[in-house]
Amino acid sequence: MRRKLAYTIVELLTVIAISAILLTLIILPVIQSFNLTRQAQALSDAQELGKRLTERVSREVSNAVAVRGASAVFVTVNGTSVRVPSTSLVVRVPRVNADGSVLLPRQEVDVLAPYTRMDLIIPAQTGQRGPTGGFIDPITGKEDPTLQNFKGQTQLPVAPGATIVRYFVGLRDPFQPYNNPYDGLLLARNGTRDNLYVLYRAEVQPRVFQTIAGNNVYAANLQYFEADANSQPILDDPRFFVPNFDGAGAVITNDAKADRIRNWLRRSVVQTEVSRYDMLQTVYDLNSRRVQNRAGIPTVIPLVQFRPTRVASEPAEGQIAVRLGQETDNADRIAPDVFTTKLGLWSNATVRTWPAGWSNLTVGNEYLVGRTDANNGQAGAAPGFSIYAYDPDGPISDDFLGGIEVFDLFTYDSVQLSGQRYPFTQAVQAANLRSNWLNDPAARSIFTPYVFDGAKGRIIASFGINEVGSSSIAPPIDNPGNLPTIASGAAETPRTAANLAGNFYDAAFSTVNQRFNKVWDMWETDTTNAFGVRNLDQSRIHRFIDLRVLNQPDGTTSPLNPNLGFKVAIVPGSEIVTGPDQNAGPNFGQPVRYVRVSTNPGPNQYRINYTSQLEPGLNGGAPDYSLIGLSGTALAGFDPAVYNAQNFASAIIQPQFKPGYIQLNSDPNTPIPDGNIRVSYRFQFTGAQSGAATGAKTDIFAVDYDSRELMSILLSIRNYPQSNLPNPQNVTLKATAKVRNFIR
């Protein structure tokens, strides 16, 4: 018989085993090569995306007019109100166990992500509005309701536009919880679609033209922003992209905030990717893969940060103190009242002031520190930025913690912005209520208050006299600025005065003409020099105003008052003196503005001391007024360091050498017409030294600040290649961009 040929079962099993081994040796490397290719592709994609993003953001920063955000705001984080930088955002992630492991069942917690929002103010563009108020597309020539701004060329000169470009980090779907199914750190690995944090870009109008209470105004665009009490948009809300939650922790999807979030989603474009790209990185231990946390709140790092550039201890440059046409005696002692830094758009500023005459010796080494205290908002602490007098030899060696509060800038700004009266006085009193610094002569002697314009990067160390007064007393109706005012008095001369009996400091001689007539009569009748004024040069007898002791109309003491102990002067050229017209004509006696001169003034003229002048005989010791003719009774009890209204030398002659002295027309035959003389001026606390004085010659301001005029974009792209590869591909890039169109 012919025998049939066939494979045995052993042979078949052997072939199958050999084939399986061969397939394993061939296919596994192929699969691994696919994974490596996917990882390489993910790395390449991340590099390309990161490069493209940093270039775009840098370009937009360079073309912007400014970068918003310089203040701190209060926000509720996990039920507690905290003070955070305005560019922070609140992100919600799963809570973990105290040991860093995944918590079941899931709970959500708030985490602060600093510097994850940036608002760019873009330049205004040319264009027109249509008949219904919409913007016209210059290409079609028709009104386009989808346009949010003028669409045309940049308007020159560059000015702020009506829209902002906002970059911010948010969930791909803000109404769903965060879901990272890849790494298994905050959540167990799962097969549901990821919901990661992505980078958005949106262009919106914060304010729109609308009618409110019958008034046509620009008010908050309620499609995107919540309005404050003044109908203005709340631009710095760290939770603007986080929906509200009910008592059970469920997302509320049918309230006004949910509608605003949907509007943001419609206007926003994801700049990363909608999947597999996460803008948060969880900090964990590489060995145990346990998440670093504090009381179950995980530590996460935002992978994009828009950081301003930090500038440390930059000396602010003083501007010109005395300009052409404002020349004055002893001008070398007049210091600038405006100091600028190289960059503007400040935030997180700390200002140190070393007053003129400062030295690093143990005596006289006190200086000033302007800062936002770490205890702001707590009982007994300043509410915001304040200026502190600091003694390095005191018990606290850190000038960011120690010192005596002397000026409350937070109160100053609040009063000014709210339209209330007298912000300077209120800022001084607010600090004094907490520190009682006005009873400290050392603090008064170095008192150098200022306000700063962080946007323009400048310190302004002067204030208007209309900022001084009592907030509990309404100013006169005809003098709403509460400006110092003195009556010229009856138009009498020393020859025609009805009554010259009494002392020069009596109330009967309180007006300009009356005081002049009395002093002239004293000089003229003191033929034997019994009173000690006959030898005084006649040119020393003036009609004058001493702004130092001329109180505000409501009775508030002038900041120039010598008994306060401030180092104070008048800003050159800031004064406005008005009084009755002294020239014959139809306007005689009517209020006119007087003109400043540097010699003896005539009709409608005045001469003013901006700062202290060199007193007679003052050469390293006390002044000697006998050198100009005073003697005997006129000098009896005279203390050059203390103002005495009843001492002739102190009240009549010494003011001629002090700041705030205004000499008027002093012709004894030509009185000033009856009326009021009113003076408006700015006073400054910066000063300079001249001669051989030791120590710093001028006040020195050094500023630490973050400048948004030079922005750093720190971007890391975190790309998960696929679900079975839990290790992401990270690419980090950095770019720096200067706001070129910023107008200082």
Image (cartoon, helix red, strand yellow):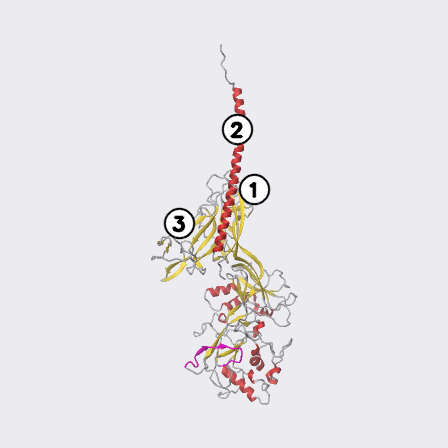
Give the magenta part as a residue range.
586-602
Residue 19 visible, this orientation: yes
Instruction: Work out whether mark 1 precedes mark 2 in sequence or the reverse, and give the earlier one.
Output: 2
- In the displayed orientation, state which residue is furthest to the right: 362
Q: Which circle's residue, 1 or 3, is located before the other in the chain?
A: 3
Q: Is mark 1 on a helix, strand or loop?
A: loop
Amino acid at pointer 2: Leu
Out of 375 and 330, give the one closest to the viewer.
Answer: 330
Q: What element carries label 2?
A: helix
Instruction: Determine whether label 1 and label 3 are within 8 Å by CB.
Output: no
Identified at 49% across, 11% down, the residue is: 2
In this view, 479 is above or below 32 = below
* Marked residue nearer the N-terminal end (2 or 3): 2
Residue 244 rendering spot, x and y as whole percentages: 44, 50
Would you call the spot at circle 1 few (<14 residues within 10 Å), some (14-19), or many (20 or more)?
Answer: some
Q: Who is closer to the viewer here, 114 or 430?
A: 114
Task: Identify the residue position indicated by label 3 in the image.
Answer: 254
Q: Is residue 565 visible?
A: no
Give the residue type at disc 3.
Asn
Label ID, residue 289: 1
